[in-house]
Amino acid sequence: MGIHVEGVTKRFGSFTALNEVSLDVQQGSLTALLGPSGSGKSTLLRVIAGLERPDAGRVTISGEDATGVAPRKRGVGFVFQHYAAFKHMTVRGNIAFGLKIRKRPRAEVRARVDELLALVQLQPFADRYPSQLSGGQRQRMALARALAVEPKVLLLDEPFGALDTRVRGELREWLHRLHDEVRVTTVFVTHDQEEAMALADQIAVLHDGRIEQVGSPRDLYDQPQTPFVMSFVGAAAQLGERWVRQHDLDLRLEPTAGALEARVERIARLGFEARVELQLAGSGTVWAQMTCAELNRLELERGDTVWVLADRARVFAESS
Amino acid sequence: MSPFSGLTLGVVVTYLSLIVALPLAALVWQSTKSGDTGFWQSLTSPEAVSALKLTLLASLAVALVNAIAGTVIAWVLVRDEFPGKGVVNALIDLPFALPTIVAGLTMLALYGPRSPLGIDVAYTRTAIVLALLFVTLPFVVRTVQPVLQELDRELEEAAESLGASDWQTFWHIVFPNLLPGILSGVALAFAKAVGEFGSVVIITGNIPFKTEVSSVYIFGQIESGNTSGAAAASVVLLAISFGVLLLIGAFRRWATRHHA
Ligand SMILES: Nc1ncnc2c1ncn2[C@@H]1O[C@H](COP(=O)(O)OP(=O)(O)O)[C@@H](O)[C@H]1O
Ligand SMILES: [Mg+2]
């Protein structure tokens, strides 16, 4: 059940946007597709929705092969980054669209739309047009519109990407509660690792059209399989062959066995947390992350020499 | 309002007065020269009324055909890929580049008594509509094309994922977005058709009560020295056209009332 993607390849001309991607999404889960811009997240989401036709591979939704099925028959709700609001219809008209297309009785449409307006807290705005709404309200309208037809899966492409930080945070919390309430299988795309970690049960990390790793937020952070995952999910520093979390860099003021000598280049205090840029004696620079309290204790100054211990560093196999 | 926009407004008003309002006022003044009775006589003569009716009906028909054909052509030019698309796209504007009298001659050669296609519609009302369709082709195409190019494809994808068929998506989502452009093009095509002279004068034969349109009737009045009668007929033609354009404009504003 849920969504099953198997060996999906998608090319645009000679460019391969998705390269043999496979992914399982559990029924009722909240899954994030995480990756940098251009990694193929939207393409994968659009392949699941049927908006792109894969060159190879299969998509199964709720146990049924959907590979050749038209988007309108897949039972997916799709929410676009820029809302795709029908601007000539009211909020009510937008939400009712899918039900009207299905020729549901008027009374039923009305009742269902009222229910959804309450769910997304847009009752006072029911008769407004999208141009009279804020970005966050438009996005909630788009969400209600997608949910109206009771989709088997809900797909969201960077749903909060066009919103300012504060509204983003609110909507994120709200989506989490909504998912707890509605329990529809949900896949959302984001390039923001914090957003993925905060919301998702499962994260799939995409990189250059491939899935690098799939796992829970905790797995990805504690057991990254590739340097890419390690550095994308939480900040990481590279010391030759070794990779280490920036907050696992241990700075000593005295020479220490197994430690690298480094010079403090720059100190940035960010409130609770502080970053220290280090020029390694060998070569290269790394950032170390610590609390400001820690930084105060060390009494570091620009130009100081320190010794860097990286006991919890990882070494990845050559293949990646 | 910035001081600059005040200045701009002044320039625009002066410009429009010189180019549009003044000639129209002169026309109205000219039309009243023969006194009230002369004015009414030139308006209510059966020949004038018949020509006016024909002109308006033919123009409305042409505007309607353009609404549909122009939209379809714009759709194909924007959404479909085919060899020679660039050439076809450039062809659309040619009816504008051709002197309309040449267009009339060409139509006569093509659809006249010696038609290579075996279609002889010369001196019939069909010929009027054909000639008008030719000279008004670009309007709707060129007003709809940019709107279609700018239309966010995600709107259609959203409709599709919500269960709409291609036709439902077009009718409920695309068409309402195109409507203002279609209406602008229709208004232009209608206005052009009402005043068109060159392309119809040859192919219609100008048979009074049958194929004589207002512009040709007016030309005949000028030829026979009745300038104020010609002016009077023109004023009525203009007044009715203006009324139709106002209506289309009002409908267009209504259709775009919620667009951001
Ligand atoms: N319709 C398309 N035509 C050509 N290239 C495309 C198309 N859609 C996406 N791409 C390319 O595929 C790659 C992945 O795109 P996308 O899935 O949108 O990435 P993401 O959502 O992760 O930023 C990008 O390099 C993009 O330029
Ligand atoms: Mg994207």
Image (spheres, coloured by chain):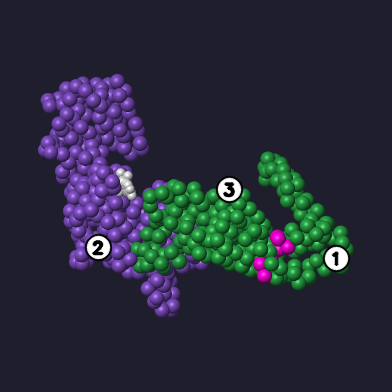
Q: Is residue B16 visible?
A: yes
Query: Crowding at label 3, few (<14), some or many (≥20) Cα neighbours within 10 Å?
Result: few
Which residues are drawn in magenta? B210-217
Amino acid on which disc 2 is placed: Gly
Q: What is the quadrant of the C terminus of chain A in the image?
A: top left
From the image, state the color of chain B.
green
Q: CA distance from mark 1 to mark 3?
A: 39 Å
Q: Is residue A8 or residue A141 the one in the foreground?
A: A8
Q: Which residue in the structure is indicated by mark 2?
A: A68
Q: Nearer the viewer, mark 1 or mark 2?
A: 1
Amino acid on which disc 3 is placed: Ala
Q: Is residue B214 magenta?
A: yes
From the image, state the color of chain A.
purple
Is residue B222 toward the left or the right of residue A204 in the image?
A: right
Give residue B97's mark: 3
Q: Are marks 1 and 2 in contact (CB under 8 Å)?
A: no
